Amino acid sequence: MAVTARTSWLEPRPGGLHCIPGDFYIDPVRSAERAVITHGHGDHARPGNHHVLATHETIAIAEARYGSRAGRSFQRVRYGETTRMGDVSIRLVSAGHVLGSAQVVLEHQGQRIVVSGDYKRSRDPTCAPFEVVTCDIFITEATFGLPVFRHPVAADEIARLLASVAATPDRCHLVGVYALGKAQRVIALLREAGYTDTIYLHGALQKLCALYQRLGVDLGDLALVEGLPKQALTGRIVMCPPSSLADRWARRMPDPVTAVASGWMRVRARAKQRGAELPLIISDHADWDELTATIREVEAGEIWVTHGREDALVHYARSIGREARALSLVGRDDEDDQDMEGIGAAVAGD
Ligand SMILES: [Zn+2]
Ligand SMILES: [Zn+2]
C-alpha cells in the first residue's frame, strides 16, 4: 500500500494519540472532549472524558469502574460498524486482549491507520479473537517486544495448576490475577479443562467477574472468600489480585500454594519477587512471535510502536523493509505489573 511517511493526520501528543481531522484522542492520558477508547484497562480507559466512543462492553467496564466519571455521553458501537467523526471514518475490530477490546481502524483521504491498542493472538475463551486488518500504518504495543518472550500455550499452564491442585489436596491454591481480563480468562480456561468446583474470589475480583457473566461469559460457580472459615478453602482454588498475595489477607488461606498468572512469570526474578511458588505464564499481551507475525500480516509500510520494549520491534520492522518509529507514549503501563520496567530493562541487557 502507498505510504505518506511522517506527515500524518494522526499525531502523538502528550495527551495521547490525537486524530487531527476528527478532533479526537485515542485512549487519552488526560481527559478529552472526544475520546475513542480501545479497552477497559486503566491505562487506556481513564475517567473524565466527555464524549466516549467504544464497544458496548468497554463502556460497561468503564461504568463499573468509574461510575458517573466514566464519561458524559457515550457512543456504543459493535465490531465492524463504521461511524464518522469529522472527516474520518472509524471502525472498531476485535483485538483479542480482554472482553470488548478493540483495534481502531481509521480512514482519511484514502489512507488507513490501525491503532491496535493492547492485543494478543493466542486463544482466549472470554473475548473475540484478534482480527487482521491490512493498513498503511499499523500502531502496535510492545509490552513483550523482545525475542526472549515466547508465551507457552495457556491451556498447558492451566494443566500445571490443576496437576498441583490434585497433588496437594491438603493445601489451597492462591492464584494472583489482574482483575480485568486475566481473572476471567484463567477461570474460563479452568472450566474448559473440566474443573467444575466452586472457584473462590477475593472481593476485589467480584464486580468484574459478575459483569463478564452478565455480558454472557460463562465462568461457572463462583463464591467470595469473605466470611468463610479457613478449613473451607482446603483443596480449593482461590483467586486474588497480585497485590493481595503478600497482604495480611493471604494469611487467612490454609497453607497456600502461591501461583501468579502473568506473562512476566517468564522472568525468574519476577516470579521470585512475587513469591510465586507456581508461576503460570499466561499473558493477555502478544509475545514476540505474535507481534512480529502481526506486523507481517497487516502489510503496513509503516509501523509505529507505542509502549513497552520498542527498540527490538522497531529494529525487526526495519529488517523486513518497513519504516518504523518508537512513539514512547507516556502513561501506558502493563496492567499485569506496573513496576516491571526495571526487570524488562534487565532482560533487554542480557
Ligand atoms: Zn490492556
Ligand atoms: Zn495497556
Image (cartoon, helix red, strand yellow):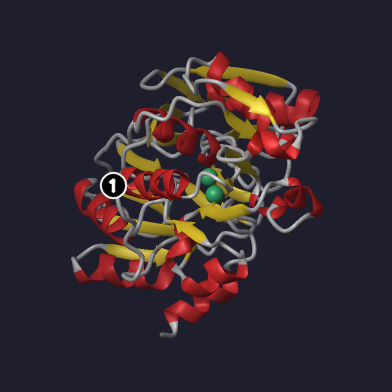
Residue 244: image location, x then y, percent: 72, 51
In the image, residue 226 sits, relative to residue 134, either above or below, namely above
**Drawn side of residue 265 relative to residue 65, left or right:** left
* Residue placed furthest toward the bottom: 350
Q: Is residue 128 something that shows in the picture?
A: no
Residue at horizontal 27 percent and vertical 65 percent from the top? 317
So how many labels did they put on this image?
A: 1
**Could you say which quadrant of the image residue 158 lies in?**
top left
**Drawn side of residue 136 relative to residue 264, left or right:** left
In the image, residue 307 sits, relative to residue 29, either above or below, namely below
Which residue does the numbered mark 1 point to in the structure image? 136
**Could you say which quadrant of the image residue 81 lies in?**
top left
Residue 178: image location, x then y, percent: 59, 45
| Dot 1 amino acid type | Asp
Quarter of the figure with the C terminus: bottom left
Q: Nearer the viewer, residue 169 or 76?
A: 169
Q: Say what secondary structure mark 1 lies in.
A: loop
**Could you say which quadrant of the image residue 57 lies in?**
top right
Query: How busy is the neighbourhood of tag 1: few (under 14 within 10 Å), some, or many (20 plus)?
Result: many
